[in-house]
Amino acid sequence: MRNIVTPGELIAPAPVMVKNAYIEGGKTYSKVLGMYDGAGRGIIPLEGAWCPTPEDTVVGMISEVKNKVYVADLSYFGRSLIVPGKYDEYNFSEGDIIAAKIKDVESRRTVILKEAELLEGGTLIRVKPKKVLRIIGKKDTMISQIAALTKTQIVVGMNGIIWLRGGNLALATEAIFRVEREAHTSGLTETIKLFLETKSV
């Protein structure tokens, strides 16, 4: 069961290596407002800015094409670049929506993307980046059930942009925003499942 922890809150009476926590006086404390499962797997922040990390999946829009280099707007971050390699065959245009992975973080305001693919059609919604892990769920359970029960294709970007296409878009969107609002509550996966099953009847 996950518990809400606040910055400075004691999470273990002994030193424990936990992400988003710090050790002081032989005890472990939370650095952030977040969800902690008590099993030492880390604390999922519920507030704060997105910090790009290599291999993160992101969703963005091509904003500029120049000399075969693509600039993509990731909304909550500065600029990102797609620099095609020898074997890459990208053919994007301004305004295209893409999903990609972060290859490298060059500076605080620039990231390099890889494995970019076009997301055709569909719609975009935005959520707080720090709520994304809760929306995805442990082992993708939350987002998988939303996609399955609404018959919607969904791609979630760690930068807080989510692409949806087909199925019951309105219901899928409502479910995602509900997870964002209630990210601090326990048993949320089952709550959302019952919500979707009731709405789908």
Image (spheres, rainbow, N blue to C red):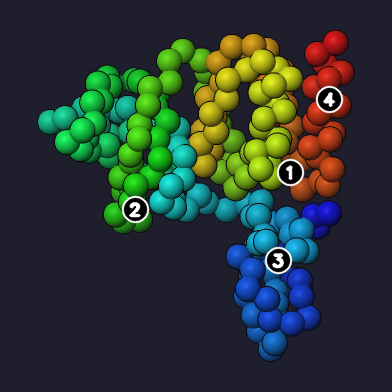
Residue linked to disc 3: 40
Name the outermost residue toward the front. Answer: 87
Residue 91 shows in the view: yes
Q: Are marks 4 and 3 in contact (CB under 8 Å)?
A: no
Residue linked to disc 4: 195
Residue linked to disc 1: 183
Residue linked to disc 2: 105
Sequence-earlier tag: 2 or 3: 3
Label 2 amino acid?
Val
SS at mark 2? strand
Distance from disc 4 to disc 2, alpha carbons, whole Å, reads 39 Å
Q: Is residue 40 left or right of residue 190?
A: left
Relative height, residue 76 to residue 2 (above, below): above
Distance from disc 2 to disc 3, alpha carbons, whole Å, reads 27 Å
SS at mark 3? loop
Q: Examine the image and state in which quarter residue 18 appears.
A: bottom right
